[in-house]
Amino acid sequence: MQILEKLQFPDELGRCHGIPLVFFDTNVLIDAEDLVRRVFKKEESGSACILCGVVCDFIEGEALNLKRGSIIAEFLDNSQYHGFYFETAYNSREGSARALEDMPSSEMREAVLVEYDRKLNPSGMLGDSKEARNAQHSKSRFGDFSLLAVATISAFRRKRQSIVITRDRWIKLSCISLQRQFKLPIYSYDQWTFSPEEILDRSQRK
């Protein structure tokens, strides 16, 4: 039996329990293994689980490409850990390039792209033509788009928190935008500042 339960995303989101889902980007998976292990660690018998970790197939793929996939293999083979493994349509450059098209609404997609434009061009002088915007977005790291799309869809469908652990400023700003404009329970934190308990506490106080 696999310890990380494999789910087809988004069709099987209903099999996730009501606790917050925690998503990690590739850098966190590599640089903050202690934090990742704490989130995936099974609680002692009788203890309430406060967070549930998720590994997405495209994040695992990036970690494997960087020769750092050992932590995933450890989770799969170790009964001390539990969480979810999402099999998505985004586990290729071609698939992930379309990730934002799957956002719950075109308005949410646009809110995310506005933040991405600002990250690419902090001066605020954005290109207004469709060609200019496409040129900007073609520079994206599609794994980041995929991660944000999966976390957003999870928050939207489950009406429960999605928490993204990343150092990417664009993802953090996009989550803030989605909170403010659409009241989505989606939050972003960096792995250096917060423990799992602090991450949950802060999201509960939003």
Image (spheres, rainbow, N blue to C red):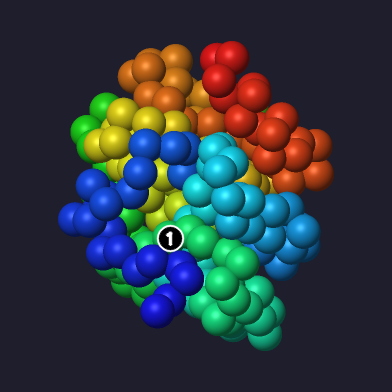
In the picture shown, does residue 182 fall above or below 65?
A: above
Q: Position of residue 169 (x, y in %)?
A: 65, 39
Relative depth, front residue between 160 and 144: 160
In the picture shown, does residue 75 fall above or below 18?
A: below
- At 59% across and 41% down in the image, what residue appears? 47
Q: Amino acid at mark 1?
A: Phe
- At 46% across and 68% down in the image, what residue appears? 4
Q: Position of residue 8 (x, y in %)?
A: 26, 64
Q: Position of residue 185 (x, y in %)?
A: 43, 26
**Which residue does the numbered mark 1 point to in the structure image?**
84
- At 62% across and 45% down in the image, what residue appears? 165
Q: Residues within 10 Å of mark 1 (few under 14, many from 20)?
A: many
- At 32% across and 55% down in the image, what residue appears? 99
The quadrant the N terminus occupies is bottom left
Direction right: furthest residue: 192
Helix, strand or loop under label 1: strand
Answer whether residue 182 is visible to the viewer in this image: yes
Q: Quadrant of residue 172?
A: top right
Direction left: furthest residue: 11
Relative depth, front residue between 118 and 24: 24
Answer whether residue 120 is visible to the viewer in this image: no
Q: Position of residue 141 (x, y in %)?
A: 52, 59
Q: Quadrant of residue 68?
A: bottom right
The quadrant the C terminus occupies is top right
Relative depth, front residue between 36 and 81: 81
